Image (cartoon, rainbow, N blue to C red):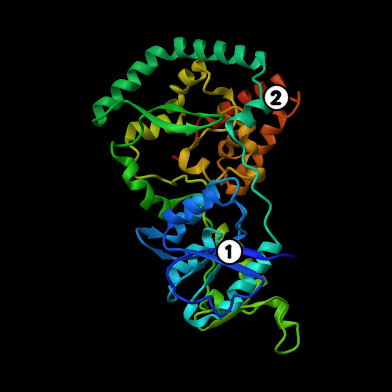
Amino acid sequence: MGGKLNILYIGNIKNYFSQAVDDNYTIVTVENSLKATRYLESNKNIDGIICDYYLPGNTGFFLYKWLRAQSEYDSMPFIILCKEFNAEIYKNAFKKQIDDFYVPSVTNPKDVLSRLTYLCAHKKPKSQKISEKIVSENYKMPVSKRLFDIFVALSVLIVASPFLLLIILAIRLESKGKVYYISKRVGRKTFDFYKLRSMRTGSDELLKKLAAEKNQYKKEEVKSENSSLDIPCPKCSKLPEGKTCSPIMYIDTHQICDYWFNVQKREAAKNDSTFVKIVDDPRITKVGKFIRNTSIDELPQLINVLKGDMSIVGNRPLPVYEAEVLTGDDLSKRFLAPPGITGLWQVELRGKGGKMSEEERMRLDNEYAEQFRGNNYSFWYDIKLILRTVPALFQSDTV
Protein backbone atom coordinates (compact mmCIF):
# COMPACT_ATOMS: atom_id res chain seq x y z
CA MET A 1 0.00 0.00 0.00
CA GLY A 2 1.61 3.24 -1.10
CA GLY A 3 1.43 6.73 0.42
CA LYS A 4 1.35 8.02 3.98
CA LEU A 5 -1.16 6.47 6.38
CA ASN A 6 -3.37 8.81 8.39
CA ILE A 7 -4.06 7.22 11.79
CA LEU A 8 -6.42 8.33 14.54
CA TYR A 9 -5.32 7.38 18.06
CA ILE A 10 -7.91 7.65 20.84
CA GLY A 11 -6.38 7.52 24.29
CA ASN A 12 -3.83 9.01 26.66
CA ILE A 13 -0.71 6.85 26.51
CA LYS A 14 1.72 9.73 26.11
CA ASN A 15 4.61 9.45 23.67
CA TYR A 16 3.88 5.77 22.94
CA PHE A 17 4.10 6.24 19.17
CA SER A 18 6.49 9.21 19.12
CA GLN A 19 9.68 7.24 18.40
CA ALA A 20 7.94 4.80 16.06
CA VAL A 21 6.40 7.36 13.72
CA ASP A 22 8.28 8.06 10.50
CA ASP A 23 7.46 9.53 7.10
CA ASN A 24 5.00 6.69 6.48
CA TYR A 25 2.56 7.77 9.17
CA THR A 26 0.62 10.76 10.42
CA ILE A 27 -0.99 10.23 13.84
CA VAL A 28 -3.73 12.45 15.22
CA THR A 29 -4.43 12.01 18.95
CA VAL A 30 -7.72 12.70 20.76
CA GLU A 31 -8.52 11.88 24.37
CA ASN A 32 -12.02 10.39 24.25
CA SER A 33 -14.69 8.88 22.01
CA LEU A 34 -16.74 12.09 21.78
CA LYS A 35 -13.79 13.99 20.31
CA ALA A 36 -13.06 10.99 18.10
CA THR A 37 -16.55 10.94 16.57
CA ARG A 38 -16.47 14.70 16.01
CA TYR A 39 -13.08 14.43 14.35
CA LEU A 40 -14.21 11.57 12.09
CA GLU A 41 -17.33 13.47 11.05
CA SER A 42 -15.21 16.40 9.89
CA ASN A 43 -12.24 14.45 8.49
CA LYS A 44 -12.84 11.69 5.95
CA ASN A 45 -9.22 10.83 5.22
CA ILE A 46 -8.45 8.55 8.18
CA ASP A 47 -7.05 5.15 7.15
CA GLY A 48 -7.13 3.34 10.48
CA ILE A 49 -7.86 3.68 14.19
CA ILE A 50 -5.90 2.71 17.30
CA CYS A 51 -7.95 3.01 20.47
CA ASP A 52 -7.37 2.50 24.20
CA TYR A 53 -9.82 0.09 25.79
CA TYR A 54 -10.32 2.32 28.83
CA LEU A 55 -11.74 5.69 27.76
CA PRO A 56 -13.36 8.44 29.88
CA GLY A 57 -17.01 7.49 30.37
CA ASN A 58 -16.96 4.27 28.30
CA THR A 59 -14.69 1.77 26.55
CA GLY A 60 -13.16 1.30 23.14
CA PHE A 61 -15.82 -1.35 22.42
CA PHE A 62 -18.54 1.32 22.43
CA LEU A 63 -16.66 3.37 19.88
CA TYR A 64 -16.07 0.26 17.76
CA LYS A 65 -19.80 -0.50 17.76
CA TRP A 66 -20.60 3.05 16.65
CA LEU A 67 -18.02 2.87 13.85
CA ARG A 68 -19.32 -0.40 12.47
CA ALA A 69 -22.83 1.05 12.38
CA GLN A 70 -21.62 3.78 9.98
CA SER A 71 -21.33 2.63 6.37
CA GLU A 72 -18.20 4.72 5.71
CA TYR A 73 -16.34 3.16 8.65
CA ASP A 74 -17.59 -0.44 8.65
CA SER A 75 -14.38 -1.75 7.08
CA MET A 76 -11.88 0.66 8.67
CA PRO A 77 -9.08 -1.21 10.54
CA PHE A 78 -9.53 -0.91 14.30
CA ILE A 79 -6.95 -1.93 16.93
CA ILE A 80 -7.52 -2.02 20.69
CA LEU A 81 -4.78 -1.21 23.23
CA CYS A 82 -5.20 -2.43 26.81
CA LYS A 83 -2.78 -1.23 29.51
CA GLU A 84 -2.53 -4.71 30.98
CA PHE A 85 -3.61 -8.10 29.72
CA ASN A 86 -7.18 -9.02 30.70
CA ALA A 87 -8.42 -12.41 29.49
CA GLU A 88 -12.09 -11.37 29.49
CA ILE A 89 -11.45 -8.21 27.45
CA TYR A 90 -9.25 -10.22 25.10
CA LYS A 91 -11.99 -12.83 24.53
CA ASN A 92 -14.60 -10.12 23.96
CA ALA A 93 -12.34 -8.48 21.39
CA PHE A 94 -12.24 -11.80 19.54
CA LYS A 95 -16.02 -12.20 19.66
CA LYS A 96 -16.68 -8.65 18.48
CA GLN A 97 -14.24 -9.29 15.60
CA ILE A 98 -12.05 -6.32 16.45
CA ASP A 99 -9.08 -6.40 14.08
CA ASP A 100 -6.38 -6.67 16.74
CA PHE A 101 -5.53 -6.45 20.42
CA TYR A 102 -2.24 -5.28 21.98
CA VAL A 103 -0.78 -4.63 25.43
CA PRO A 104 1.46 -1.53 25.05
CA SER A 105 3.70 -2.40 28.01
CA VAL A 106 4.95 -5.54 26.25
CA THR A 107 4.50 -4.51 22.61
CA ASN A 108 6.83 -2.46 20.45
CA PRO A 109 4.79 0.43 18.94
CA LYS A 110 6.43 -0.29 15.59
CA ASP A 111 4.74 -3.69 15.61
CA VAL A 112 1.35 -2.05 16.20
CA LEU A 113 1.90 0.36 13.29
CA SER A 114 3.20 -2.46 11.11
CA ARG A 115 0.06 -4.46 11.86
CA LEU A 116 -2.17 -1.49 11.03
CA THR A 117 -0.31 -1.03 7.74
CA TYR A 118 -1.04 -4.68 6.90
CA LEU A 119 -4.73 -4.28 7.81
CA CYS A 120 -5.05 -1.16 5.67
CA ALA A 121 -3.53 -2.98 2.71
CA HIS A 122 -5.91 -5.91 3.15
CA LYS A 123 -9.17 -4.23 4.09
CA LYS A 124 -12.24 -6.37 4.48
CA PRO A 125 -14.99 -5.60 1.96
CA LYS A 126 -17.77 -3.44 3.34
CA SER A 127 -20.63 -5.50 4.72
CA GLN A 128 -23.60 -5.68 2.39
CA LYS A 129 -26.37 -4.54 4.72
CA ILE A 130 -29.95 -5.01 3.60
CA SER A 131 -32.06 -2.03 4.55
CA GLU A 132 -35.83 -1.89 4.43
CA LYS A 133 -35.57 0.21 1.28
CA ILE A 134 -33.45 -2.37 -0.52
CA VAL A 135 -35.72 -5.21 0.57
CA SER A 136 -38.82 -3.39 -0.62
CA GLU A 137 -37.22 -2.86 -4.03
CA ASN A 138 -36.40 -6.57 -4.36
CA TYR A 139 -39.63 -7.96 -2.96
CA LYS A 140 -43.25 -7.49 -3.95
CA MET A 141 -46.07 -9.48 -2.37
CA PRO A 142 -47.77 -11.54 -5.10
CA VAL A 143 -51.48 -10.72 -5.38
CA SER A 144 -52.45 -14.41 -5.18
CA LYS A 145 -50.52 -14.81 -1.94
CA ARG A 146 -52.10 -11.73 -0.32
CA LEU A 147 -55.66 -12.74 -1.27
CA PHE A 148 -55.05 -16.25 0.03
CA ASP A 149 -53.68 -14.85 3.31
CA ILE A 150 -56.77 -12.69 3.90
CA PHE A 151 -59.17 -15.54 3.07
CA VAL A 152 -57.44 -18.08 5.34
CA ALA A 153 -56.91 -15.68 8.24
CA LEU A 154 -60.56 -14.54 8.29
CA SER A 155 -61.92 -18.07 7.91
CA VAL A 156 -59.82 -19.55 10.71
CA LEU A 157 -60.53 -16.67 13.12
CA ILE A 158 -64.29 -16.99 12.59
CA VAL A 159 -64.33 -20.80 12.99
CA ALA A 160 -61.93 -20.84 15.96
CA SER A 161 -63.40 -17.89 17.89
CA PRO A 162 -65.56 -19.97 20.36
CA PHE A 163 -62.60 -22.22 21.17
CA LEU A 164 -60.28 -19.20 21.49
CA LEU A 165 -62.59 -17.70 24.12
CA LEU A 166 -62.26 -20.88 26.24
CA ILE A 167 -58.46 -20.84 25.93
CA ILE A 168 -58.32 -17.16 26.87
CA LEU A 169 -60.42 -17.89 29.98
CA ALA A 170 -58.11 -20.80 30.96
CA ILE A 171 -55.01 -18.62 30.61
CA ARG A 172 -56.56 -15.91 32.77
CA LEU A 173 -57.62 -18.35 35.51
CA GLU A 174 -54.22 -20.05 35.75
CA SER A 175 -51.99 -16.99 36.08
CA LYS A 176 -52.28 -13.25 36.45
CA GLY A 177 -51.55 -10.87 33.60
CA LYS A 178 -52.76 -10.19 30.08
CA VAL A 179 -53.88 -13.21 28.08
CA TYR A 180 -52.00 -12.05 25.03
CA TYR A 181 -48.36 -11.17 24.50
CA ILE A 182 -46.95 -8.46 22.26
CA SER A 183 -43.32 -8.27 21.24
CA LYS A 184 -41.39 -6.42 18.58
CA ARG A 185 -40.42 -8.65 15.68
CA VAL A 186 -38.50 -8.05 12.48
CA GLY A 187 -39.61 -9.30 9.08
CA ARG A 188 -39.40 -6.94 6.15
CA LYS A 189 -40.01 -4.25 8.79
CA THR A 190 -40.37 -4.07 12.58
CA PHE A 191 -43.92 -4.69 13.83
CA ASP A 192 -46.00 -5.69 16.89
CA PHE A 193 -46.20 -9.47 17.00
CA TYR A 194 -49.21 -11.11 18.73
CA LYS A 195 -49.32 -14.42 20.62
CA LEU A 196 -51.41 -15.95 23.38
CA ARG A 197 -49.42 -15.79 26.60
CA SER A 198 -47.94 -19.19 27.45
CA MET A 199 -45.52 -18.03 30.17
CA ARG A 200 -45.77 -16.47 33.58
CA THR A 201 -45.56 -12.69 33.64
CA GLY A 202 -42.05 -11.25 34.02
CA SER A 203 -40.53 -14.10 32.01
CA ASP A 204 -38.30 -11.88 29.88
CA GLU A 205 -36.09 -11.20 32.90
CA LEU A 206 -35.09 -14.88 33.04
CA LEU A 207 -34.25 -15.16 29.34
CA LYS A 208 -30.58 -14.16 29.58
CA LYS A 209 -29.84 -16.74 32.28
CA LEU A 210 -31.81 -19.51 30.56
CA ALA A 211 -30.24 -18.78 27.17
CA ALA A 212 -26.82 -19.54 28.61
CA GLU A 213 -28.00 -22.84 30.11
CA LYS A 214 -30.64 -24.31 27.78
CA ASN A 215 -30.37 -22.64 24.36
CA GLN A 216 -31.03 -25.28 21.70
CA TYR A 217 -28.88 -23.43 19.19
CA LYS A 218 -25.90 -22.84 21.51
CA LYS A 219 -22.68 -24.16 20.06
CA GLU A 220 -20.81 -26.88 21.93
CA GLU A 221 -17.84 -25.33 23.67
CA VAL A 222 -14.47 -26.74 22.81
CA LYS A 223 -12.80 -27.72 26.07
CA SER A 224 -9.05 -27.56 26.29
CA GLU A 225 -6.54 -27.52 29.11
CA ASN A 226 -4.41 -25.03 27.19
CA SER A 227 -5.09 -21.38 26.49
CA SER A 228 -5.81 -20.62 22.83
CA LEU A 229 -2.62 -18.56 22.86
CA ASP A 230 -0.58 -21.69 23.63
CA ILE A 231 -1.84 -23.68 20.65
CA PRO A 232 0.87 -23.63 17.93
CA CYS A 233 0.11 -22.42 14.42
CA PRO A 234 0.05 -25.42 12.05
CA LYS A 235 1.63 -23.41 9.23
CA CYS A 236 4.47 -22.08 11.38
CA SER A 237 5.14 -25.60 12.68
CA LYS A 238 6.09 -26.71 9.16
CA LEU A 239 8.67 -23.92 8.74
CA PRO A 240 12.30 -23.88 9.92
CA GLU A 241 12.86 -22.71 13.50
CA GLY A 242 12.65 -18.93 13.79
CA LYS A 243 10.51 -18.58 10.66
CA THR A 244 6.80 -17.70 10.77
CA CYS A 245 4.06 -17.77 8.16
CA SER A 246 2.98 -14.18 8.98
CA PRO A 247 4.06 -11.28 11.22
CA ILE A 248 4.39 -12.02 14.94
CA MET A 249 2.10 -10.42 17.54
CA TYR A 250 2.97 -10.13 21.23
CA ILE A 251 0.13 -10.54 23.74
CA ASP A 252 1.10 -10.58 27.41
CA THR A 253 3.87 -13.22 27.61
CA HIS A 254 2.66 -14.99 24.48
CA GLN A 255 3.68 -14.80 20.84
CA ILE A 256 1.22 -15.60 18.08
CA CYS A 257 1.43 -15.12 14.33
CA ASP A 258 -1.04 -12.94 12.47
CA TYR A 259 -2.57 -15.84 10.50
CA TRP A 260 -3.24 -18.03 13.55
CA PHE A 261 -4.58 -15.10 15.58
CA ASN A 262 -7.24 -14.40 12.94
CA VAL A 263 -8.15 -18.09 12.57
CA GLN A 264 -8.83 -18.29 16.32
CA LYS A 265 -10.71 -14.99 16.26
CA ARG A 266 -13.12 -16.34 13.63
CA GLU A 267 -13.65 -19.51 15.68
CA ALA A 268 -14.34 -17.47 18.81
CA ALA A 269 -16.94 -15.42 16.93
CA LYS A 270 -18.71 -18.61 15.81
CA ASN A 271 -19.27 -19.65 19.43
CA ASP A 272 -21.87 -16.90 19.84
CA SER A 273 -25.24 -18.33 18.88
CA THR A 274 -27.50 -16.10 16.79
CA PHE A 275 -30.83 -17.70 17.59
CA VAL A 276 -32.18 -18.30 21.09
CA LYS A 277 -34.68 -21.09 21.71
CA ILE A 278 -35.03 -22.59 25.18
CA VAL A 279 -35.49 -26.36 25.60
CA ASP A 280 -38.05 -27.47 28.28
CA ASP A 281 -38.52 -23.85 29.34
CA PRO A 282 -39.52 -23.71 33.07
CA ARG A 283 -41.29 -20.36 32.54
CA ILE A 284 -44.15 -22.06 30.63
CA THR A 285 -47.52 -22.57 32.40
CA LYS A 286 -49.63 -25.75 32.16
CA VAL A 287 -52.10 -24.11 29.77
CA GLY A 288 -49.11 -22.59 28.00
CA LYS A 289 -47.58 -26.01 27.41
CA PHE A 290 -50.82 -27.23 25.84
CA ILE A 291 -51.28 -24.25 23.53
CA ARG A 292 -47.62 -24.41 22.50
CA ASN A 293 -47.70 -28.14 21.75
CA THR A 294 -50.82 -27.63 19.64
CA SER A 295 -49.59 -24.28 18.20
CA ILE A 296 -52.80 -22.60 19.42
CA ASP A 297 -50.67 -19.78 20.85
CA GLU A 298 -49.89 -18.79 17.25
CA LEU A 299 -53.53 -18.06 16.29
CA PRO A 300 -53.43 -14.30 17.16
CA GLN A 301 -50.82 -13.95 14.43
CA LEU A 302 -53.73 -14.23 12.01
CA ILE A 303 -54.43 -10.63 13.06
CA ASN A 304 -50.89 -9.80 11.94
CA VAL A 305 -51.72 -11.46 8.62
CA LEU A 306 -54.86 -9.35 8.17
CA LYS A 307 -52.85 -6.20 8.97
CA GLY A 308 -50.29 -7.13 6.31
CA ASP A 309 -47.42 -7.57 8.79
CA MET A 310 -47.13 -11.29 8.01
CA SER A 311 -48.17 -13.99 5.60
CA ILE A 312 -49.52 -17.49 6.26
CA VAL A 313 -46.32 -18.97 4.83
CA GLY A 314 -42.92 -17.33 5.15
CA ASN A 315 -39.79 -17.11 7.29
CA ARG A 316 -40.44 -16.67 10.98
CA PRO A 317 -40.11 -13.02 12.08
CA LEU A 318 -37.19 -12.60 14.47
CA PRO A 319 -36.90 -10.82 17.80
CA VAL A 320 -34.92 -7.61 17.40
CA TYR A 321 -31.89 -8.97 19.27
CA GLU A 322 -31.65 -11.87 16.80
CA ALA A 323 -32.26 -9.78 13.69
CA GLU A 324 -29.49 -7.33 14.61
CA VAL A 325 -26.81 -9.93 13.94
CA LEU A 326 -28.30 -10.99 10.59
CA THR A 327 -27.69 -7.74 8.71
CA GLY A 328 -24.77 -8.77 6.55
CA ASP A 329 -23.92 -10.97 3.56
CA ASP A 330 -25.90 -14.16 2.88
CA LEU A 331 -27.53 -14.30 6.31
CA SER A 332 -29.81 -11.35 5.51
CA LYS A 333 -31.20 -13.04 2.40
CA ARG A 334 -34.01 -14.46 4.59
CA PHE A 335 -35.54 -10.95 4.83
CA LEU A 336 -36.34 -11.00 1.11
CA ALA A 337 -39.26 -13.31 1.93
CA PRO A 338 -42.31 -12.17 3.91
CA PRO A 339 -42.47 -13.17 7.59
CA GLY A 340 -44.89 -16.05 8.09
CA ILE A 341 -46.79 -18.16 10.62
CA THR A 342 -45.40 -21.37 9.18
CA GLY A 343 -42.49 -21.98 6.86
CA LEU A 344 -39.97 -24.36 5.41
CA TRP A 345 -37.83 -24.92 8.51
CA GLN A 346 -40.85 -25.71 10.70
CA VAL A 347 -42.08 -28.52 8.47
CA GLU A 348 -38.62 -29.83 7.62
CA LEU A 349 -37.26 -30.28 11.13
CA ARG A 350 -39.42 -29.05 13.97
CA GLY A 351 -42.42 -30.99 12.70
CA LYS A 352 -40.33 -34.18 12.61
CA GLY A 353 -39.20 -33.66 16.20
CA GLY A 354 -35.57 -33.36 15.17
CA LYS A 355 -33.03 -30.96 16.60
CA MET A 356 -32.09 -28.05 14.40
CA SER A 357 -28.74 -26.32 14.23
CA GLU A 358 -28.43 -22.61 13.58
CA GLU A 359 -26.78 -23.29 10.22
CA GLU A 360 -29.69 -25.54 9.10
CA ARG A 361 -32.25 -22.93 10.02
CA MET A 362 -30.38 -20.22 8.11
CA ARG A 363 -30.08 -22.48 5.08
CA LEU A 364 -33.80 -23.28 5.02
CA ASP A 365 -34.78 -19.63 5.50
CA ASN A 366 -32.57 -18.63 2.59
CA GLU A 367 -33.92 -21.47 0.46
CA TYR A 368 -37.49 -20.20 0.86
CA ALA A 369 -36.40 -16.59 0.24
CA GLU A 370 -34.91 -17.56 -3.13
CA GLN A 371 -38.48 -17.73 -4.48
CA PHE A 372 -38.78 -13.96 -4.18
CA ARG A 373 -35.84 -13.16 -6.41
CA GLY A 374 -37.29 -12.40 -9.79
CA ASN A 375 -40.60 -14.11 -10.50
CA ASN A 376 -39.94 -17.52 -8.95
CA TYR A 377 -42.83 -17.48 -6.46
CA SER A 378 -45.01 -20.61 -6.52
CA PHE A 379 -48.47 -20.48 -4.94
CA TRP A 380 -48.66 -24.28 -4.97
CA TYR A 381 -45.37 -24.54 -3.09
CA ASP A 382 -46.99 -22.54 -0.25
CA ILE A 383 -50.00 -24.88 -0.31
CA LYS A 384 -47.69 -27.90 0.02
CA LEU A 385 -45.96 -26.31 3.03
CA ILE A 386 -49.34 -25.65 4.67
CA LEU A 387 -50.37 -29.28 4.17
CA ARG A 388 -47.06 -30.45 5.61
CA THR A 389 -47.58 -28.15 8.61
CA VAL A 390 -50.58 -30.14 9.88
CA PRO A 391 -48.52 -33.07 11.28
CA ALA A 392 -46.13 -30.53 12.82
CA LEU A 393 -48.88 -28.85 14.86
CA PHE A 394 -48.80 -31.54 17.53
CA GLN A 395 -45.37 -32.00 19.09
CA SER A 396 -44.05 -33.36 22.38
CA ASP A 397 -41.52 -30.64 23.16
CA THR A 398 -42.09 -27.04 24.20
CA VAL A 399 -39.49 -25.17 22.18
Which circle marks residue 75 in the picture? none
In the shown orientation, is residue 278 left or right of residue 337?
left
Q: Which mark is residue 7?
A: 1
Q: Is residue 26 visible in this depiction of the protein?
A: yes
In this rendering, position of residue 391 left or right of residue 172: right
Q: Which of marks 2 and 1 is nearer the N terminus?
A: 1
Residue type, label 2: Tyr
Mark 1: few/some/many CA within 10 Å (<14, 14-19, 20+): many
Q: Where is residue 250 in the image (x, y as percent from the top left)?
A: 56, 79
Is 248 located above or below residue 126 in the figure? below
Looking at the image, the residue that sits furthest to the front is 23
Foreground of the two, 21 or 187: 21
For the N terminus, the image quarter is bottom right
Horizontal and vertical percent position of residue 89:
44, 67
Residue shown at 47% from the left, 56% from the top: 36
Location of residue 195 (image quadrant):
top left
The residue that appears at 46% across and 58% down in the rendered structure is 61
Is 253 placed above or below 191 here?
Answer: below
Total numbered labels placed on residues in the image = 2
The type of residue carrying mark 1 is Ile
From the image, tell me which residue sits under label 2.
Answer: 381
